Amino acid sequence: MHRFVVLPLVILLAAPAAWAKDPSPAEALRMRLEASRKDDDAAEWIVALKELASTYARATKKERPKLMREAGRAFEGGSVVVKQTALKAILDTEDGDVAWKEALRRVFPKVEAETPGTWDVEVLKAVYVLRPDGAIDPLLKLMKKAKSPQLAAGGLRVLGAYERSKKRVYVLKELAEIVVANAPGRSRKGSRGSDRFWAMATQLEATLNELTGQSFKLKDWGPVWKENKKHPERLFKNPLPKS
């Protein structure tokens, strides 16, 4: 004869909670960041942000975007100190592609801005350090179309950091063609494009040389590009690092 054990109802109801797994360290930190943001608890927010890099390093590939996205939300409403802490924490992850997609692209300088804000400068500095490929086209757009000359020059400055990027030939082509288009006798004096070019001429020379490892004068970049246009990799002093 079989005997049946009848469990108390209270145990049966409590069982699912008892069996639930604790959140992973990455999810636990994401939840702390979210709670700090919603409570506007700057002190706890800063403490949690300072744990981002170490926790991020141990997080799974699936967890990382969610954690980075929540860290980046500090840019939307946090105090200056919270924002600065978040930016440093994101830089410390050294994951440029995820940082760009989940955080930095949302606060990237706008081409419509008349003057750069302090935060615009800090974001451009962060992009320079992390060098995410996703930022290349926005940087080129900023350089070509920004109303603010300082932001245009800032975007151009950052492009010099892409020497080790697989898209460096694309960046070089975009910049070298600007030099060719504005060579003496080709650009229309007083045109908006020409004026922008000459306003950024010194920075353009510096960026081209930083990007390639060369030391050409700006006036030489046009002829050099035409000579090597079919084999642009020759213009880079250092080979791409092996991935």
Image (spheres, rainbow, N blue to C red):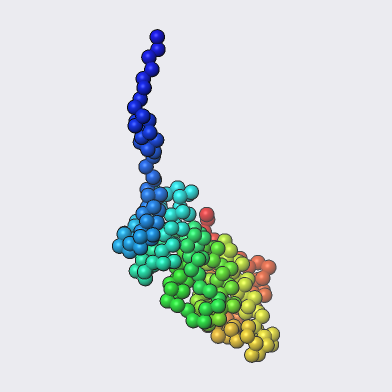
| Quarter occupied by residue 23 | top left
Q: Please, which residue is most extreme toward the top here?
A: 1
On the question of residue 104 being in view, the answer is yes
Q: Is residue 10 left or right of residue 212?
A: left
Question: Is 58 rendered above or below residue 194?
Answer: above
At x 57% / y 61%, what residue is drawn?
Answer: 166
Q: Nearer the viewer, residue 21 or 9?
A: 9
At x 38% / y 60%, what residue is drawn?
Answer: 37
Assign the N terminus to one quadrant of the image.
Answer: top left
Q: Nearer the viewer, residue 228 or 196?
A: 196
Question: Is 55 rendered above or below residue 208?
Answer: above
Q: Is residue 217 left or right of residue 89?
A: right
At x 52% / y 60%, what residue is drawn?
Answer: 101
Question: Is 98 rendered above or below residue 181?
Answer: above
On the question of residue 208 being in view, the answer is no
Indicate the position of residue 78 as horizontal and vertical percent values: 39, 66
